[in-house]
Amino acid sequence: MKFSPSELMTIAIAEGEKARLHAPPNPWVGAIIVSDRGVIVSEGHTQAPGESHAEIVALRRARGATHGATLFVTLEPCGHVGRTGPCAEAIIEAGVARVVVGMIDPDPRVAGKGVELLKASGVDVEVGIEEEAVRRQLAPYIWHRVTSRPYVVAKIASTLDGVVAMADGTSQWITGAEARRDAHVLRAQSQAILVGAGTVRSDDPALTARLDDIVLEPLRVVLGRAPESAKVRPCLELSGDLGLVLDELGHRDVLQLLVEGGPTTTSAFLDAGLVNHVVWYQAAAFGGGEGTLAALRGLSTPTMEALRRGRIVDVRRIGEDIRIDVEV
């Protein structure tokens, strides 16, 4: 079966997704090597920081069947020495004839230099196959490299009418087990999780990511001061201007920040225009307005012209709940 270039890049994208949890602060890149007959020879994805990049993994797995082959890779191969050697040089040495790249790497250390090195060595290079899909997959990495700040995801779990706590203050659990597990995947994909001190005092969350028998511990960030006995400790306590908070986290190589704070914290990030993406889990339940707590109670919208609009990019059912993804 012969695949089109778009189909082959889609396979590389799927391979890159395998690196989503362990690659950061490096990008989660996928690569495949295709023979001159159109047969997929090998696949590879980025390993943990300091270990091999996707291209190197694919080259090794090809076991020498690389001369005259085509390499499909989601992100431009690096041409500089970092924690590992330059991928572009390894591709050239392997005798690869053609490289198809999803998108140019925005990292200033790369930014076209890898492609230039390949072309200067006689390798045929094509850029831009399935670029939009690659950009969606690598959005946190791209945002961090361009702005030096983390990509901010705000997570909300509510009733269908936007209530996050009942009149007596209880909030666990509004959504079902399947949605909660999906939220733990979201935690695992984030290098830091942020809540306000009020949420720590009221809910005492551990803010770990639990995936089956695996427990991951992203950097836990509290706006304000956490009680000494709080489960969230050890944590990073920050306060003040939210933009400066993001600057600090970006400096710490946080590519994606998950804001799980209550209505006050989430509203503050939205009001400041600092949220890139909202993940909203909604249960088929109704809380009403009398004494309950609204998900964005702290957000004020004085006029229709001031209404904050986003773009719905995905809606799917998870168990008995729904997940709505919105780009802000």
Image: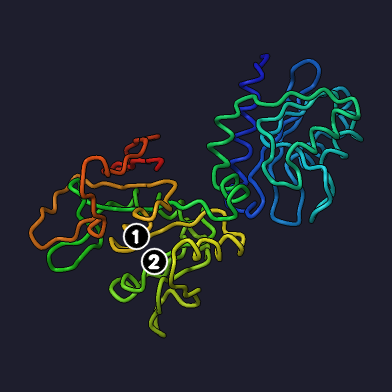
Establish if 297 lies above or below 20: below
Q: CA distance from mark 2 to mark 1?
A: 12 Å
> Please, what is the three-letter code of the amino acid marked with disc 2?
Val
Give the mark nearer the N terminus: 2 vs 1. 2
Picture residue at 40% right of the left edge, 34% below the top: 313
306 relative position to 270: left or right:
left
Residue assigned mark 1: 268
Picture residue at 39% right of the left edge, 66% below the top: 195
Q: Nearer the viewer, residue 314 or 47?
A: 314
- Quarter of the image for the C terminus: give it: top left
17 relative position to 227: left or right:
right
> Are there few (<14), some (14-19), or many (20+) residues within 10 Å of tag 1?
some
Q: Position of residue 325 (x, y in %)?
A: 38, 41
Image mark for residue 195: 2
Q: Position of residue 112 (x, y in %)?
A: 75, 36
> Please, what is the three-letter code of the amino acid marked with disc 1?
Ala
Q: Nearer the viewer, mark 2 or mark 1?
A: 1
Establish if 277 lies above or below 252: above
Establish if 159 lies above or below 10: below
Colour logic = rainbow
